[in-house]
Image: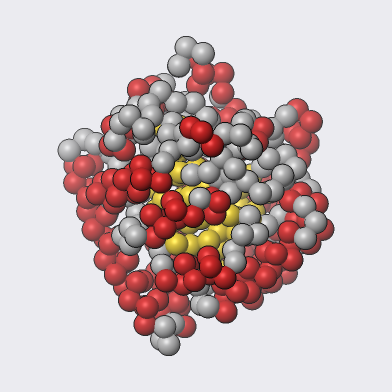
């Protein structure tokens, strides 16, 4: 196994490779080419802003996560968001407004944040926020969606705004996907991918890795199918158990080793794709990237959390700026107590250290 793998270098080279290939394939689409070239300039400008802050003793992460919706049109088995009540049918009353999300996106641009991941619930259920994101061209917004709401209207929105990048969730083959997400979901996903590919829209996929699907989702055949459909980015996220009864499908050290070895091999085979593993790749960055080291999470109600799997907060974006939220006392305590570093039993450091995180807040 290649222990010298450098995540930052891989990301830089892979993104450049994708941009190069998209540029070549989009010669007949000046709109795509123009956006990509402008965005590469924006990325350099954003990095300069972050470097200036760093030189003065501060820190701005390149990524931000935002759960923009509490509703979802699916009821997936073992859903973490529903289990911790960040997703449900009667939670809309406290959601951040479209206008405030628009302000947050512009604040992120000014700080030098290059990527804002939009999560849910199902993010496409709040189209107004997606449209706010579309207007901030200096940021790329990967949208983590179940794919079932990607209709002609959304295809047109993605086509006109290339900074919106759908990341479609898939659990493996038809039986595995429909088994967790509901009968017919797989066909809807395939149709959505075909529609995006036909328009030449850059999109990716997101796989929740379990003990049940790991051999399928890391196989060459599965990846080849997604590649043929047009998928160019794939995120492997280790399943986080919501109850004791689902711990048996959470990856163990055995599955993590399989995932790491297979992803390394896939990176060699599929040169024009980007493969990321969460939280597996974090070890190449010196520990957990949450709590502002590499990113932090804004929940649908405005709370600034270390990450989606550590849903605890002491500041709210309804009452403070993004810059102020980065100075969260909780984030500082996590850094000072070195809770983001070291060995742990599960895939997510802060999930495994939940009681210690709660203690910092006096809970």
Residue 318 in picture, x, y percent from top left = 36, 32
Choose between 172 and 323: the one closer to the eye: 323
Is any part of residue 157 visible from this angle? yes
182 displayed left or right of 97:
right
Is any part of residue 3 visible from this angle? no
Q: Residue at x 29, y 69 (%)?
A: 38
Residue 227 in picture, x, y percent from top left = 62, 72
Outermost residue toward the bottom in this view: 28
Choose between 149 and 33: the one closer to the eye: 149
77 displayed left or right of 199:
right
Q: How is the image coloured?
A: secondary structure
Check the picture and name the quadrant holding the N terminus. Answer: bottom right
Query: In which quadrant of the rendered view does residue 323 lie?
Result: top left
Residue 363 in picture, x, y percent from top left = 51, 13
Look at the picture and state if 362 lies above or below 320: above
Look at the picture and state if 141 lies above or below 71: below
Q: Which residue is drawn at 45% across and 44% down?
A: 65
Residue 316 in picture, x, y percent from top left = 38, 29
Q: Residue at x 53, y 43 (%)?
A: 69
Query: In which quadrant of the rendered view does residue 169 lie?
Result: bottom right
| Image mark count | 0
87 displayed left or right of 62:
right
Q: Residue at x 69, y 68 (%)?
A: 190
Outermost residue toward the top in this view: 362
């Amino acid at each position: 196994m290649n222990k010298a793998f450098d995540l930052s270098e891989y990301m830089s080279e892979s993104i450049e490779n994708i941009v190069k290939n998209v540029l070549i394939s989009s010669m007949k689409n000046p709109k795509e080419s123009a956006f990509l070239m402008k965005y590469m300039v924006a990325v350099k400008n954003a990095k300069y802003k972050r470097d200036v802050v760093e030189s003065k003793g501060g820190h701005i992460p390149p990524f931000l996560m935002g759960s923009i919706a509490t509703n979802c049109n699916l009821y997936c088995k073992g859903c973490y968001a529903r289990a911790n009540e960040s997703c449900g049918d009667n939670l809309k009353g406290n959601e951040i407004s479209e206008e405030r999300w628009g302000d947050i996106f512009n604040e992120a641009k000014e700080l030098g944040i290059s990527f804002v991941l939009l999560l849910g619930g199902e993010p496409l259920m709040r189209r107004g926020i997606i449209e706010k994101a579309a207007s901030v061209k200096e940021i790329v917004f990967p949208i983590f969606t179940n794919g079932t709401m990607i209709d002609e209207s959304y295809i047109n929105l993605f086509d006109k705004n290339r900074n919106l990048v759908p990341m479609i969730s898939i659990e493996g083959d038809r039986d595995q996907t429909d088994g967790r997400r509901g009968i017919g979901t797989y066909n809807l996903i395939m149709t959505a991918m075909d529609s995006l590919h036909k328009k030449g829209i850059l999109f990716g996929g997101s796989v929740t890795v379990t003990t049940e699907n790991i051999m399928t989702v890391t196989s060459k055949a599965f990846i080849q199918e997604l590649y043929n459909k047009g998928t160019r980015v794939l995120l492997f996220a280790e399943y986080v158990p919501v109850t004791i009864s689902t711990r048996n499908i959470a990856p163990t050290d055995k599955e993590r080793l399989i995932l790491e070895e297979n992803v390394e091999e896939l990176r060699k085979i599929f040169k024009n794709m980007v493969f990321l593993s969460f939280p597996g790749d974090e070890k190449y960055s010196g520990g957990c990237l949450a709590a502002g080291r590499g990113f932090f999470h804004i929940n649908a109600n405005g709370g600034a959390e270390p990450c989606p799997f550590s849903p605890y907060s002491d500041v709210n974006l309804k009452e403070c700026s993004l810059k102020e939220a980065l100075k969260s006392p909780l984030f500082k305590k996590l850094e000072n107590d070195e809770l983001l570093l070291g060995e742990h039993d599960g895939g997510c450091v802060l999930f495994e250290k939940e009681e210690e995180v709660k203690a910092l807040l006096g809970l």
